[in-house]
């Protein structure tokens, strides 16, 4: 036995586990999980005492930007995965809007290899739907799948051509890979930079109406119904979008959806004073939308909480609002912000962990997000009562861009284990027993 | 803070009468003379002097008012810029004898600013200075032609001229900031 | 007063009134033979214009010179900005000259606010994107007050492209603070989302909107809005929303007509109206100078002293 985690409160929705017990790890795999007392083999086993702490499957983020290759000044696979494990994630999926775009097996292989040699956790690339994300010709999905891609998306530059989107949903069926839709009607968004409403008028900023997202979600749902393809809606931000997904699911259309912590915590008001840290796409919406997104999480309309971790360099945000980059650095706050839903009584802990572990893994067809015996030991140990104040300067991500600066949050990962190895620990005192 | 009344209403009236006589005497009448008061108390005093001269000579002398905010040399030092009041210069001051009027002559900087301001309206033949109180401590080579009363003061003291135009009584007060001195 | 004039929406009503009162003294200065005062001698202003502007830049420049301020003009054609240095670096460079005022015109909203956060100088918004143009609103308010004696209770109509007009936005906030009754008149496409919260009434038909109006402000209609689908043609616009003498007849007999310039005669305003006795368009230009002098004078004192 290489490692035993004992006396921790284990929650694993994939197996319906919710008890205080022990996890046994050998050769990087979980070999046993039990809720009885631990039998320690003296001398040869390292033991991690998780008393008072919670033990979850390592979190799975199905929507992140690691920026490498091409934008290493914003983030690298190394810095990004280092931030991911600090945030409790052991598997992250990186979007293809790199330079060059991840639209072929070479780029996909580069990312996979780089992650294996430098990464702190599992990295699963998401390939582009179309070549160069230009929305004209389908990219080589099959080759990318073989190179390690787990889904396809033209994130940030949605496929505007409905026929092409139809083909993508049809073609990807062969590879059982979901098409992830950044749902936005670009012509309606009209180069907007924040949510359209009274506030955008007051600030004199071009608005992106909620309808821009809702229309695109509805189109893609219709195409999913038409094709039977696997559609996943990324970062749902609107009440109308939640409603459309709910109706589609009720009608038996196979669609899944995610949202991000900023969409269930923040409104467009954050944009006041031209705060570029709150510039994100889709934009922060209204209180009504925040309520609807929360409602969608509660009733299961929204399957997954992802980060949409979008790190940017200081210069990309320290500028005119119109010129500032869209995006929020999310790895290091996502778990705590999501846990707030549990603390607020909106979700059970089991529901939350499900949305951050087994659900994204299922959607992507990964054997992750679970503490089943025999799987790789990706585990996060969290102290749900530890308070901290968000300080972007303390982020290990290169992207310090967060609108949550100064927020007091409660609960954080203290140890993250990937493939049986400790990749992050809050402080050495937790490692007392020989790790 | 210690406040002491130095001059009362009748003191002030007597001083103004004497100054009016001096102005008439020095200018051999009041032809070509006009009076310019510096906001705010200077304007009230200017009007009173004009009225006294009218009673003595039977001639009405034009009164103008001057706001010197735009000409001050202490804008950099002040926390707030002064409230700008209306400058009313209904007369052509070119080749006129100007009696510039203020309530208290102290450092001389206000008078310097007032002369700069006047110069932007034209080229007077002469500028004479009339003040109700001269309290000393000049920082510029400026001297009054007509003085109601010389009151030697220390810099820690402050002279306040209250006039019925915006106070209950005519009164000159000396205010000392630190009673221990 | 704050050290900056970034917008009217966050300006205190008392400050607006102080600016208007002070402007009246500067207007007197402008009527003299010697129109210059030494007030801001030794101060330096940078006119930083990222958008072409003749009127506003000239007005600011003259206002600065009348106050004896040293003036630097920094005109940056917007096309070259993308490849050039960042705005942050531009501001930091300019600041190194030890300047006191930055007058900023930019095609993006919120740029004056951004500059204000990174600069110690007094920042004056000379028009930012589709956000605000505060000194225009102040000079309009000054003009109305001069013409009508008061602003409170007046019925004031703003006609035209409200959606893309920073002039309209600033005027709405300013006149609302000063107690006017504001009506907007425009087709639905040119009314921005939520603006009904800030005005008394919105009309889409000029004939009814203009009834009993004391003041009518017409806004410039930009040709490019036609291609944006906001209206179909300038001819049609003029037919339905153009200010003609006939339409003006429905307003109060002493109505005044204003326009921030430059005018498109025959698009938003008929020539006969622009040249009529109701027009105060040229007075607006003179008043712009006095108001900008007042703003410079008052902001100067609001900057923290060493």
Image (cartoon, rainbow, N blue to C red):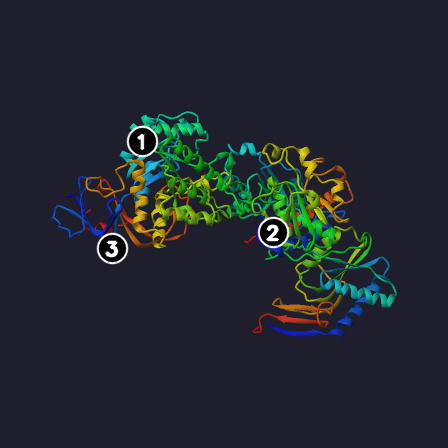
Mark 2 vs mark 3: same chain? no
| Residue receiving disc 2 | C299
The reply to whether the C-beta atoms of the residues labelled 3 and 1 are less than 8 Å apart is no
Few, some or many residues within 10 Å of mark 2 (<14, 14–19, 20+): many
Tell me if I can see residue A185 in this picture: yes
Mark 2 in CB contact with mark 3 (< 8 angstroms)? no
Report the front residue among A431 and A224.
Answer: A224
Q: Secondary structure at mark 1?
A: loop
Residue at 43 percent across and 31 percent down: it is A159
Are both tags, 3 and 1, on one chain? yes
Residue highlighted by disc 3: A52
The residue beneath circle 1 is: A176
Q: Residues within 10 Å of mark 1 (few under 14, many from 20)?
A: some
Q: Chain of mark 3?
A: A
Q: Which residue is nearer to you in this view: A158 or C4?
A: A158
Q: Is residue A394 visible?
A: no
- What is the quadrant of residue B148 in the picture? bottom right
Compared to A169, does B82 lie above or below? below
Q: Residue at x 57, y 38 (%)?
A: C107
């Amino acid at each position: 036995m290489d490692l035993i985690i004992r006396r921790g409160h284990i929650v694993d929705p994939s197996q319906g586990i919710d008890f205080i017990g022990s996890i046994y790890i050998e050769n990087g795999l979980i070999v046993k999980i039990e809720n009885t007392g631990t039998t320690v083999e003296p001398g040869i086993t390292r033991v991690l005492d998780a008393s008072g702490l919670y033990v979850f499957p390592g979190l799975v983020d199905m929507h992140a930007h690691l920026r490498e290759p091409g934008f290493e000044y914003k983030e690298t696979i190394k810095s990004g995965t280092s931030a991911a494990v600090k945030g409790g994630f052991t598997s992250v999926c990186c979007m293809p809007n790199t330079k060059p775009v991840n639209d072929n097996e070479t780029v996909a292989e580069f990312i996979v290899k780089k992650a294996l040699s430098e990464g702190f956790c599992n990295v699963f690339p998401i390939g582009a739907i179309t070549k160069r994300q230009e929305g004209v010709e389908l990219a080589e999905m099959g080759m990318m799948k073989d190179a390690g891609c787990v889904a396809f998306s033209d994130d940030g530059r949605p496929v505007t051509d409905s026929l092409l989107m139809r083909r993508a949903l049809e073609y990807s069926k062969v590879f059982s890979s979901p098409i992830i839709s950044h749902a936005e009607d670009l012509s309606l968004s009209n180069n907007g930079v924040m949510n359209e409403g009274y506030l955008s008028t007051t600030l004199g900023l071009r608005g992106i109406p909620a309808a821009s997202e809702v229309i695109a979600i509805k189109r893609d749902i219709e195409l999913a119904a038409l094709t039977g393809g696997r559609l996943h809606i990324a970062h749902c931000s609107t009440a109308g979008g939640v409603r459309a997904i709910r109706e589609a699911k009720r009608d038996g259309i196979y669609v899944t959806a995610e949202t991000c912590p900023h969409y269930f915590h923040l409104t467009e008001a954050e944009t006041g004073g031209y705060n570029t840290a709150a510039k994100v796409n889709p934009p922060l919406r209204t209180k009504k939308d925040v309520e609807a997104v929360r409602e969608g999480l509660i009733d299961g309309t929204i399957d997954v909480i992802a980060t949409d971790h979008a790190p940017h360099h200081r210069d990309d945000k320290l500028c005119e609002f119109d010129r500032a980059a869209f995006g929020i650095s999310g790895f290091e706050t996502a778990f705590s912000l999501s846990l707030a839903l549990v603390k607020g009584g909106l979700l059970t802990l089991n529901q939350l962990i499900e949305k951050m572990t087994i659900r994204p893994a299922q959607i992507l067809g990964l054997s992750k997000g679970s503490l089943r015996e025999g799987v790789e030991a990706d585990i996060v140990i969290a102290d749900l009562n530890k308070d901290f104040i968000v300080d972007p300067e303390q982020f290990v991500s290169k992207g310090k861009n967060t609108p949550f600066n100064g927020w007091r949050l409660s609960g954080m990962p203290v140890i993250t284990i990937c493939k049986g190895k400790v990749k992050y620990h809050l402080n050495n005192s937790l490692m007392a027993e020989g790790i | 803070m210690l406040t002491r009344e130095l001059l009362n209403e009748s003191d002030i009236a007597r001083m103004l009468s004497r100054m009016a006589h001096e102005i008439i005497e020095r200018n051999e009448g009041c032809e070509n003379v006009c009076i310019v008061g510096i906001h705010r108390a200077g304007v009230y005093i200017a009007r009173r002097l004009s009225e006294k001269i009218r009673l003595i000579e039977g001639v009405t002398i034009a009164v103008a008012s001057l706001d010197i905010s735009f000409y001050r040399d202490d804008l950099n030092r002040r926390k707030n810029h002064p409230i700008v009041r209306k400058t009313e210069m209904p007369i052509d001051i070119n080749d006129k004898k100007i009696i510039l009027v203020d309530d208290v002559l102290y450092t001389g900087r206000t008078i310097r600013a007032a002369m700069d301001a006047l110069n932007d309206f034209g080229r007077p033949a002469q500028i004479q200075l009339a003040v109700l109180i001269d309290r000393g401590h000049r920082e510029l080579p400026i001297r009054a032609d007509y003085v109601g009363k010389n009151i030697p003061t220390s810099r820690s003291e402050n002279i306040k001229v209250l006039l019925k135009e915006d106070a209950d009584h005519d009164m000159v007060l000396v205010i000392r900031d630190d009673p221990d001195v | 007063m704050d050290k900056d004039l970034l917008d009217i929406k966050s300006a205190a009503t008392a400050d607006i009134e102080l600016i208007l009162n002070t402007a009246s003294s500067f207007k007197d200065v402008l009527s003299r033979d010697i129109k210059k005062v030494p007030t801001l001698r030794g101060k330096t202003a940078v006119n930083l214009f990222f958008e072409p502007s003749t009127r506003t830049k000239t007005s600011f420049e003259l206002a600065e010179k009348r106050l004896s301020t040293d003036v630097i003009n920094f005109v940056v054609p917007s096309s070259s900005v993308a490849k050039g240095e960042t705005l942050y670096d531009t501001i930091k460079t300019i600041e190194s000259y030890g300047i006191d005022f930055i007058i900023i015109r930019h095609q993006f909203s919120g740029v004056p606010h951004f500059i204000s956060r990174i600069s110690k100088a007094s920042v004056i918004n000379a028009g930012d994107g589709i956000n605000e143009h505060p000194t225009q609103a102040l000079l309009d308010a000054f003009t109305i007050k001069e013409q009508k004696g008061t602003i409170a209770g007046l019925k004031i109509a703003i006609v035209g492209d409200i959606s893309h007009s920073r002039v309209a936005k600033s005027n709405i906030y300013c006149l609302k603070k000063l107690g006017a009754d504001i009506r907007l008149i425009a087709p639905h496409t040119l009314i921005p989302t939520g603006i009904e919260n800030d005005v008394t009434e919105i009309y889409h038909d000029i004939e009814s909107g203009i009834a009993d109006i004391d003041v009518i402000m017409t806004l410039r209609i930009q040709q490019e809005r036609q291609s944006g689908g906001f209206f179909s043609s300038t001819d049609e616009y003029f037919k339905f929303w153009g200010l003609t003498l006939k339409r003006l007849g429905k307003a109060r007999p002493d109505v005044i007509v204003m326009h921030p310039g430059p005018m498109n005669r025959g698009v938003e305003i008929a020539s006969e109206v622009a040249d009529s006795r109701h027009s105060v368009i040229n007075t607006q230009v003179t008043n712009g100078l006095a108001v900008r002098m007042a703003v410079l004078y008052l902001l100067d004192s609001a900057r923290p002293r060493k």
